[in-house]
Image (spheres, rainbow, N blue to C red):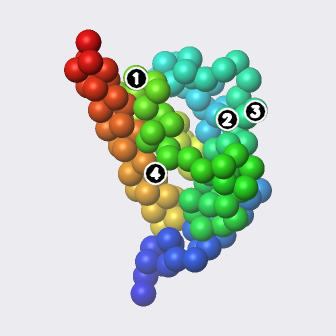
Amino acid sequence: MTTTEVYGNADASYQAAGAINGIRQLVDDFYMLLDTEPVARDIRAMHPASLDMARDKLACFLSGWLGGPRLYSEKYGSISIPVFHAQWPIDQAHSEAWLHCMTLAIARQNYSASFAEYLLRQLRIPAQRVVQASSNRRAAQQTWR
C-alpha cells in the first residue's frame, strides 16, 4: 500500500493535516491569501468584511470532511456545500481562483508532498460541484423568466 492510499481512510487525512490546530492554520493562511491575492478579489467580495465566521465554518467543515470530528454539524447543523454556494454566481474562474489560494495555503503548511497533492486533488471535487450547482441555479432562474 502506498502512502497516498492511506489518506481518506478513518482519520488519516485529519491527522496528516495536523488535526484541528493544523486545519485552523491552513484555513487562516487560506483566508489571508484570499485577502491578498489579486486573482481572488471577486471571491473575497462575496464574503462579509469579517472573515471570522467563514474561518470557523471552513475549519469545522474540513475537520469532518478529512475524517476528524464532525464539528460543523455539531455547531452549525448539516450542509451541502454545492447547494449552499449556489446562491452566488460561481463560475470556473472563481473555482480556479479559490483553488489557487488553497494551493498556496497548502504549500505554507508542513504537510508531506503526498498529502499536499492528495488534499488538493480532493478539494478539486467540491470546487467543481460548486460551479455546477451555481450554473444549474442560474439556468433554472433563466428558465423561469
Amino acid carrying mark 4 in the image: Leu
Residue 132 pos. (x, y %): 32, 38
Residue 75 pos. (x, y %): 74, 50
Give whichever of discs 4 and 3 has the lower sequence position: 3
- Regarding mark 1 in the picture, which secondary structure is present there? loop
What distance separates the C-alpha of mark 4 from that of mark 3? 21 Å
Q: Are marks 3 and 2 in contact (CB under 8 Å)?
A: yes
Q: Which residue is mark 1?
A: 89
Q: Which of the image's four quarters has the C terminus? A: top left
Q: Residues within 10 Å of mark 4 (few under 14, many from 20)?
A: few
Q: Is residue 142 above or below residue 33?
A: above
Q: Residues within 10 Å of mark 1 (few under 14, many from 20)?
A: some
- Image mark for residue 52: 3
Give whichever of discs 1 and 4 has the lower sequence position: 1
Give whichever of discs 1 and 3 has the lower sequence position: 3
Q: Which residue is mark 2?
A: 54
- Regarding mark 4 in the picture, which secondary structure is present there? helix
